[in-house]
Image (cartoon, rainbow, N blue to C red):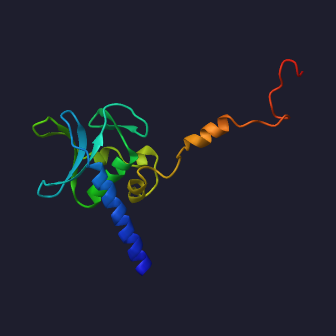
Amino acid sequence: MSIQRALLAGGAFFLACATAQAGSTTPKPGDTYIISRDGNKLFRGSHRIYDRMADGLVQVQYCGRSYWVRYATVAWTQLEVQREYEVRVEFNRGKGWRPICDHPEEQVTLEDLGVQDDPRLVVQNDGSTVNRVNRFSVIREAFKTTSGDSAAKSYHGN
């Protein structure tokens, strides 16, 4: 029983760290976020979403508009709804937040993105645990030499 409690406490700690990290940057006018609010409309947490592609982001659509998000953002959105918080896409106008889209959790799920992992694991790992590409392995494979038998024959070798 104590191992289960330790794992649960560790998972809660990592989830809290990921949530705190996601909301640690100060929003600037023009930034778009998915924001979580409780039943009293009080801020609970946020994840930034982007208007253009970048490494590690996946394209999604909320209310007919394209955004680029991290897999962890989609997972976090699902977890916030499970906690009975309201999530929506909001835009920072510099003088306050303007709602753009309600219920993003109904529009994009991890399953829609081809991820079968538990949302807690995706948030903890800051992305899916499957199909991770190690750049160094790809580079190593690109420069790997082949044996003489399987190497391509040169013009002079034939």
Between 45 and 64, the one nearer to me in the picture: 45
Residue at 32% from the left image edge and 58% from the top image edge = 17
Q: Is residue 49 visible?
A: yes
| Image spot of residue 4 (x, y percent) | 42, 75
Residue at 23% from the left image edge and 60% from the top image edge = 84
Image-based side of 16 in relation to 127, left or right: left
Which quadrant: the N terminus? bottom left
The answer to whether 117 is drawn above or below residue 52 in the figure is below
Residue at 34% from the left image edge and 31% from the top image edge = 52
Between 82 and 72, the one nearer to me in the picture: 72
The answer to whether 54 is drawn above or below residue 134 in the figure is above
| Image spot of residue 55 (x, y percent) | 43, 36
The answer to whether 15 is drawn above or below residue 73 in the figure is below
Between 132 and 86, the one nearer to me in the picture: 132
Which quadrant: the C terminus? top right
User: Which residue is most to the top?
Assistant: 155
Residue 149 image-quadrant placement: top right
Q: How many marks?
A: 0
Residue 70 image-quadrant placement: top left
Residue 67 image-quadrant placement: top left
| Image spot of residue 83 (x, y percent) | 26, 61
| Image spot of residue 66 (x, y percent) | 32, 33
